[in-house]
Image: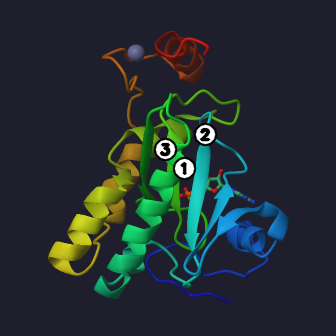
Amino acid sequence: MKNCSITNFKMNENHWSFNLIREIKNPKSILEEDEFVYIIKDKYPKSTYHYLIIPKKDIPSISKVTKDDLELLHHMEHTGNKYIDSHKDYDFQMGYHAVPNMYRLHLHVISTDFISNSLKTVRHWNIFNTPYFLPSKDICKELEDKGHVFIDIKKYEKYLSCKLKCHKCSYTPKNMVDLKKHIIEHFPVK
Ligand code: AMP
Ligand code: ZN
Protein backbone atom coordinates (compact mmCIF):
# COMPACT_ATOMS: atom_id res chain seq x y z
CA MET A 1 0.00 0.00 0.00
CA LYS A 2 1.39 3.41 -1.00
CA ASN A 3 0.66 6.40 1.19
CA CYS A 4 1.53 9.75 -0.38
CA SER A 5 -0.05 12.61 1.49
CA ILE A 6 -0.21 15.34 -1.18
CA THR A 7 -1.38 13.12 -4.04
CA ASN A 8 -4.21 10.61 -4.31
CA PHE A 9 -2.12 7.46 -4.18
CA LYS A 10 -3.24 6.12 -0.78
CA MET A 11 -4.54 2.96 -2.32
CA ASN A 12 -3.89 -0.58 -3.34
CA GLU A 13 -1.27 -1.14 -6.06
CA ASN A 14 -3.87 -3.05 -8.10
CA HIS A 15 -5.72 0.23 -8.58
CA TRP A 16 -5.67 1.75 -12.12
CA SER A 17 -3.55 4.65 -10.87
CA PHE A 18 -0.62 2.19 -10.73
CA ASN A 19 -0.99 1.18 -14.38
CA LEU A 20 2.17 3.03 -15.44
CA ILE A 21 4.12 0.82 -13.04
CA ARG A 22 2.59 -2.24 -14.71
CA GLU A 23 3.60 -0.84 -18.12
CA ILE A 24 7.26 -0.33 -17.20
CA LYS A 25 7.39 -3.93 -15.96
CA ASN A 26 6.28 -5.10 -19.41
CA PRO A 27 9.19 -5.07 -21.90
CA LYS A 28 6.70 -4.85 -24.80
CA SER A 29 5.54 -1.43 -23.56
CA ILE A 30 8.99 0.11 -23.35
CA LEU A 31 10.18 2.08 -26.37
CA GLU A 32 13.58 2.67 -24.82
CA GLU A 33 15.29 2.72 -21.43
CA ASP A 34 18.61 3.72 -19.95
CA GLU A 35 20.15 3.64 -16.47
CA PHE A 36 17.70 6.30 -15.21
CA VAL A 37 14.46 6.32 -17.22
CA TYR A 38 11.89 4.38 -19.24
CA ILE A 39 10.14 5.86 -22.26
CA ILE A 40 6.67 4.57 -23.16
CA LYS A 41 3.88 5.74 -25.45
CA ASP A 42 0.88 7.22 -23.68
CA LYS A 43 -1.85 4.58 -24.06
CA TYR A 44 -4.55 7.22 -24.55
CA PRO A 45 -2.59 9.85 -26.50
CA LYS A 46 -4.08 13.33 -26.39
CA SER A 47 -2.21 14.39 -29.53
CA THR A 48 -0.55 12.88 -32.60
CA TYR A 49 2.59 12.15 -30.59
CA HIS A 50 2.44 11.61 -26.85
CA TYR A 51 5.25 9.97 -24.89
CA LEU A 52 5.81 9.51 -21.15
CA ILE A 53 9.26 9.53 -19.57
CA ILE A 54 9.24 7.68 -16.26
CA PRO A 55 12.20 7.61 -13.87
CA LYS A 56 13.50 4.34 -12.48
CA LYS A 57 13.78 6.07 -9.10
CA ASP A 58 10.48 5.66 -7.28
CA ILE A 59 9.31 9.29 -7.03
CA PRO A 60 5.50 9.51 -6.64
CA SER A 61 4.92 12.90 -8.27
CA ILE A 62 6.44 16.30 -9.03
CA SER A 63 5.54 17.63 -5.58
CA LYS A 64 7.88 15.03 -4.06
CA VAL A 65 11.07 15.86 -5.96
CA THR A 66 14.05 17.25 -4.04
CA LYS A 67 17.14 19.13 -5.12
CA ASP A 68 18.89 15.73 -5.36
CA ASP A 69 16.55 14.94 -8.26
CA LEU A 70 17.50 17.99 -10.33
CA GLU A 71 20.00 16.08 -12.45
CA LEU A 72 17.41 13.35 -13.05
CA LEU A 73 14.82 15.93 -14.17
CA HIS A 74 17.37 17.45 -16.55
CA HIS A 75 18.06 13.98 -17.91
CA MET A 76 14.32 13.36 -18.41
CA GLU A 77 14.07 16.65 -20.32
CA HIS A 78 17.13 15.79 -22.41
CA THR A 79 15.60 12.39 -23.23
CA GLY A 80 12.32 14.09 -24.19
CA ASN A 81 14.20 16.43 -26.51
CA LYS A 82 15.57 13.44 -28.43
CA TYR A 83 11.98 12.34 -29.17
CA ILE A 84 10.96 15.88 -30.10
CA ASP A 85 13.89 16.08 -32.53
CA SER A 86 12.67 12.93 -34.26
CA HIS A 87 9.42 14.66 -35.32
CA LYS A 88 10.76 17.84 -36.89
CA ASP A 89 7.46 18.87 -38.49
CA TYR A 90 5.58 19.04 -35.16
CA ASP A 91 5.80 21.46 -32.24
CA PHE A 92 5.90 19.89 -28.79
CA GLN A 93 5.44 20.79 -25.15
CA MET A 94 7.09 18.95 -22.31
CA GLY A 95 5.99 19.05 -18.69
CA TYR A 96 4.18 17.65 -15.67
CA HIS A 97 0.60 17.77 -14.48
CA ALA A 98 0.32 19.72 -11.24
CA VAL A 99 -1.91 17.04 -9.69
CA PRO A 100 -1.38 13.82 -11.63
CA ASN A 101 -3.75 10.86 -11.79
CA MET A 102 -1.14 8.15 -12.23
CA TYR A 103 1.49 6.94 -9.84
CA ARG A 104 5.15 7.55 -10.33
CA LEU A 105 6.46 10.79 -11.66
CA HIS A 106 6.12 11.04 -15.45
CA LEU A 107 7.13 13.71 -17.92
CA HIS A 108 4.63 14.29 -20.75
CA VAL A 109 6.26 14.85 -24.15
CA ILE A 110 3.35 15.80 -26.38
CA SER A 111 2.93 17.38 -29.81
CA THR A 112 0.78 20.50 -29.72
CA ASP A 113 -1.73 19.64 -32.45
CA PHE A 114 -4.01 17.93 -29.89
CA ILE A 115 -5.67 16.01 -32.68
CA SER A 116 -6.64 12.70 -31.14
CA ASN A 117 -9.70 10.53 -30.60
CA SER A 118 -8.64 10.12 -26.97
CA LEU A 119 -8.96 13.85 -26.33
CA LYS A 120 -12.59 14.07 -25.28
CA THR A 121 -13.27 16.16 -22.22
CA VAL A 122 -12.80 19.72 -20.98
CA ARG A 123 -10.49 18.24 -18.36
CA HIS A 124 -8.35 16.59 -21.05
CA TRP A 125 -7.98 19.97 -22.74
CA ASN A 126 -7.34 22.05 -19.65
CA ILE A 127 -4.70 19.77 -18.12
CA PHE A 128 -2.52 20.43 -21.17
CA ASN A 129 -3.56 23.96 -22.08
CA THR A 130 -3.72 25.93 -18.83
CA PRO A 131 -1.12 26.56 -16.10
CA TYR A 132 -2.13 23.11 -14.76
CA PHE A 133 0.54 21.89 -17.20
CA LEU A 134 3.90 22.73 -15.62
CA PRO A 135 6.63 23.10 -18.25
CA SER A 136 9.71 21.03 -17.46
CA LYS A 137 11.96 24.10 -17.79
CA ASP A 138 9.97 26.02 -15.13
CA ILE A 139 9.99 23.04 -12.77
CA CYS A 140 13.77 22.61 -13.09
CA LYS A 141 14.24 26.35 -12.42
CA GLU A 142 11.97 26.24 -9.34
CA LEU A 143 13.82 23.20 -8.00
CA GLU A 144 17.17 24.85 -8.61
CA ASP A 145 16.14 28.16 -6.99
CA LYS A 146 14.02 26.92 -4.08
CA GLY A 147 15.10 23.32 -3.55
CA HIS A 148 11.53 22.01 -3.84
CA VAL A 149 8.40 22.26 -6.03
CA PHE A 150 5.37 23.65 -4.23
CA ILE A 151 1.95 22.58 -5.54
CA ASP A 152 -1.10 24.45 -4.25
CA ILE A 153 -3.72 21.82 -5.12
CA LYS A 154 -6.68 24.19 -4.64
CA LYS A 155 -5.16 26.74 -7.02
CA TYR A 156 -4.53 24.18 -9.74
CA GLU A 157 -7.86 22.38 -9.44
CA LYS A 158 -9.59 25.60 -10.52
CA TYR A 159 -8.05 25.23 -13.98
CA LEU A 160 -9.76 21.89 -14.58
CA SER A 161 -13.14 23.44 -15.24
CA CYS A 162 -12.10 26.80 -16.65
CA LYS A 163 -13.61 28.06 -19.92
CA LEU A 164 -12.31 26.41 -23.08
CA LYS A 165 -9.98 28.45 -25.24
CA CYS A 166 -8.06 27.58 -28.40
CA HIS A 167 -4.31 27.38 -27.74
CA LYS A 168 -3.51 28.96 -31.10
CA CYS A 169 -5.92 31.92 -31.27
CA SER A 170 -8.48 33.81 -29.20
CA TYR A 171 -11.41 31.54 -30.15
CA THR A 172 -13.52 30.40 -27.20
CA PRO A 173 -15.53 27.35 -28.27
CA LYS A 174 -18.87 26.41 -26.75
CA ASN A 175 -17.82 22.83 -26.08
CA MET A 176 -15.29 20.12 -27.00
CA VAL A 177 -17.00 19.23 -30.29
CA ASP A 178 -16.69 22.86 -31.34
CA LEU A 179 -13.07 23.07 -30.18
CA LYS A 180 -12.07 19.87 -31.98
CA LYS A 181 -13.57 21.11 -35.25
CA HIS A 182 -11.78 24.41 -34.79
CA ILE A 183 -8.24 23.17 -33.99
CA ILE A 184 -8.13 21.09 -37.17
CA GLU A 185 -8.06 24.42 -39.04
CA HIS A 186 -4.75 25.26 -37.38
CA PHE A 187 -3.27 21.89 -38.32
CA PRO A 188 -3.98 21.04 -41.95
CA VAL A 189 -3.37 17.34 -42.67
CA LYS A 190 0.33 16.76 -43.42
P1 AMP B 1 -1.41 12.35 -15.46
O1 AMP B 1 -1.29 11.41 -14.30
O2 AMP B 1 -2.62 13.21 -15.43
O3 AMP B 1 -0.16 13.20 -15.64
O4 AMP B 1 -1.52 11.50 -16.79
C1 AMP B 1 -1.41 10.11 -16.85
C2 AMP B 1 -1.26 9.71 -18.30
O5 AMP B 1 -1.10 8.30 -18.36
C3 AMP B 1 -2.47 10.06 -19.17
O6 AMP B 1 -2.03 10.86 -20.26
C4 AMP B 1 -3.01 8.70 -19.61
O7 AMP B 1 -3.52 8.70 -20.92
C5 AMP B 1 -1.78 7.81 -19.49
N1 AMP B 1 -2.06 6.39 -19.25
C6 AMP B 1 -3.04 5.84 -18.50
N2 AMP B 1 -2.91 4.50 -18.46
C7 AMP B 1 -1.80 4.20 -19.19
C8 AMP B 1 -1.14 2.99 -19.54
N3 AMP B 1 -1.57 1.80 -19.09
N4 AMP B 1 -0.04 3.07 -20.33
C9 AMP B 1 0.40 4.24 -20.80
N5 AMP B 1 -0.19 5.43 -20.50
C10 AMP B 1 -1.27 5.41 -19.71
ZN1 ZN C 1 -7.80 28.80 -32.88
Q: Mark 1 points at which residue?
A: 83
**Mark 2 or mark 3, earlier in chain:** 2
Whether pointer 2 and pointer 1 mark residues with C-beta atoms closer than 8 Å, the reply is yes
Q: Is residue 147 left or right of residue 166?
A: left
Residue contact between numbered discs 3 and 1, judged by CB atoms under 8 Å? yes
Circle number at residue 170 = none
Label 3: which residue? Answer: 85
Report the colour scheme.
Answer: rainbow
Q: Is residue 110 above or below residue 166?
A: below
Task: State the quadrant of the C terminus.
Answer: top right
Q: Does the residue labelled 2 lie within 8 Å of ligand 1?
A: no
- Residue 72 coordinates in the image, percent (x, y): 42, 77
Disc marking residue 49:
2
Q: Which residue is drawn at 30% across and 16% down?
A: 170
Q: Does the residue labelled 3 lie within 8 Å of ligand 1?
A: no
Mark 3 neighbour class, 10 Å CA radius: few under 14, some 14 to 19, many 20 or more: few
Judge by depth and name the residue closer to the eye, 4 or 105: 105
Name the side, left or right, on which 41 lies relative to 178. right
Is 11 left, or right, of 83 in this rendering?
A: right
* Residue at position x 67%, y 80% in the image: 11
Query: What is the three-letter code of the residue carrying label 1?
Result: Tyr
| Residue 74 position by quadrant | bottom left
Residue 67 location, x and y as percent?
Answer: 29, 84
